[in-house]
DNA sequence: AGCCGAACCGGATTGTCAATCCGCTTCGGT
DNA sequence: ACCGAAGCGGATTGACAATCCGGTTCGGCT
């Protein structure tokens, strides 16, 4: 399906991605495509062909983080202790978003905005893994009844949002994560850790 | 300080607010001021004089909700049971945001964006009430140590965000609120309600 | 009643940015 | 070395925010 892309085209695509990554790292999540083009030293048209949309570029930027998350999720789903699995999963989902704002934007908006099939696939895969983790947790009765895998997803994204409001998430991260995890767990057996 | 505004000016200001309220109610939180002007049947200039910024208009729209929230917060701070106070406060903060998207946007962004002194004052007042509620809760040892009043604020805004992601918050509201409240509470005495 | 200046109005205009379109250039297979 | 497909670039269109200023209206005052 995907004809292998000409040499110069591939080079340009990479340049755009690199430039965009720089911009995001510098805190400019607005990602004005015209700007990116200028900084990457090429015409707007070129940028727009590779990434027809701000969203498309965002998804491309987020791809690595998404892949990494899937690894985390697989690990979580295979952990023998069900609750630990949940912890790993939610913590990973949170941390990956904090580490990569582009990824955060991609994963915390409704799926029907997806542009690339790749992102959609990733999303599905993650969903499936999350359901597995939650399944174990339910069997072990460590997660409060009535919560769906989507609920967990949403709640983590909410926590990310909460962390974004003030400044300097750093020290707040563990605190908020603890609140979320405790809130999700069923009437607990031992509730003093750290 | 505020010269009482000429009759026609007041009329126009109200027209803008009414139009904007309609727009928000119809789900257009983008609030394009040019658009509002057209729909309100006046020039853009007029709108811009009354509300120099999208943000200013938003704050004006949010004013009522904010006042109502302050009432709730006062009630919460005077409740004899400390934990109930917390519940009332957080629930109110959540519900008011769900009921009024403009208010949600105003209260869930960092204070240094405030345009009107009025909003800033409201914000301070709320902060103070929240501190009072949290103070009682701490004395009664019903809220997990290490959480500040700002933390609570952020976490509620995060929950609102979480509710916004999917569609139809309705049935999810209580579920998410429960998660938050349980997560905030100290190692609980009786944890089965509803 | 009618005057007058301050307050207010309107919309043409400027500036920013997303997104498209199409004539020209470059690539790479033959 | 040739040539058609693939890619490029930037002028252009369009949407919207925000400003500016000549004309209009208000309402206190005589």
Image (cartoon, coloured by chain):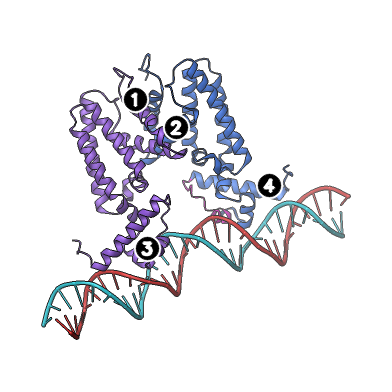
Chain colours: A blue, B purple, C red, D cyan
Q: Nearer the viewer, mark 1 or mark 4?
A: 1
Residue A113 in picture, x, y percent from top left: 55, 44
Residue topped by disc 3: B40
Tell me which corner region of the image, top left, top right, bottom left or bottom right, holds residue B134. Answer: top left
Q: Is the Cβ of the residue at disc 2 closer than 8 Å to that at disc 1?
A: no
Which residue is located at x 33 percent, y 56 percent?
Answer: B57
Q: Is the Cβ of the residue at disc 3 closer than 8 Å to that at disc 1?
A: no
Q: Is the residue marked by circle 1 packed among few (<14), some (14-19), or many (20+) residues within 10 Å?
A: many
Q: Nearer the viewer, mark 3 or mark 1?
A: 3
Residue topped by disc 4: A10
Disc 2/disc 3 C-alpha distance (Å): 40 Å
Q: Is the residue marked by circle 3 packed among few (<14), some (14-19), or many (20+) residues within 10 Å?
A: many
Tell me which corner region of the image, top left, top right, bottom left or bottom right, holds residue B141. Answer: top left
Disc 3/disc 1 C-alpha distance (Å): 46 Å
Where the N terminus of chain A falls, by quadrant? top right
Q: Nearer the viewer, mark 2 or mark 3?
A: 3
Classify mark 4: helix, strand or loop.
helix
Residue topped by disc 1: B182
Start-end of magenta stretch: A26-38
User: The numbered mark 2 sits on a residue in which chain?
Assistant: A
Q: Is the residue marked by circle 4 packed among few (<14), some (14-19), or many (20+) residues within 10 Å?
A: few
Residue B73 in picture, x, y percent from top left: 23, 38
Classify mark 3: helix, strand or loop.
helix
In the image, is D27 to the left or to the right of D7?
left
User: The numbered mark 3 sits on a residue in which chain?
Assistant: B
Q: Are marks 2 and 1 on the same chain?
A: no
Check residue A156 in the rendering and tell me which mark sits there, or answer none. Answer: 2
| Figure check: D28 above or below B71 | below
Residue A33 falls within the magenta-colored stretch: yes
């Amino acid at each position: 399906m995907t004809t292998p892309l000409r040499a110069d085209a591939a080079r340009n695509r990479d340049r755009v991605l690199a430039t965009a990554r720089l911009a995001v790292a510098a805190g400019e999540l607005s990602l004005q495509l015209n700007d990116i083009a200028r900084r990457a030293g090429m015409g707007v048209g070129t940028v727009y062909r590779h990434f027809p949309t701000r969203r498309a570029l965002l998804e491309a930027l987020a791809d690595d983080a998404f892949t990494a998350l899937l690894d985390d999720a697989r690990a979580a789903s295979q952990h023998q202790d069900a609750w630990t699995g949940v912890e790993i999963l939610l913590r990973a989902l949170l941390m990956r978003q904090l580490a990569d704002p582009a990824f955060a934007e991609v994963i915390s908006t409704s799926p029907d905005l997806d542009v690339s099939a790749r992102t959609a696939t990733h999303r599905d895969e993650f969903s499936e893994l999350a359901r597995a983790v939650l399944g174990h947790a339910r069997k072990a009765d460590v997660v409060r009844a009535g919560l769906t895998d989507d609920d967990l997803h949403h709640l983590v994204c909410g926590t990310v949002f909460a962390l974004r409001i003030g400044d300097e998430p750093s020290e707040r991260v563990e605190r908020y994560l603890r609140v979320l995890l405790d809130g999700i767990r069923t009437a607990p057996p031992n509730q003093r850790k750290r």
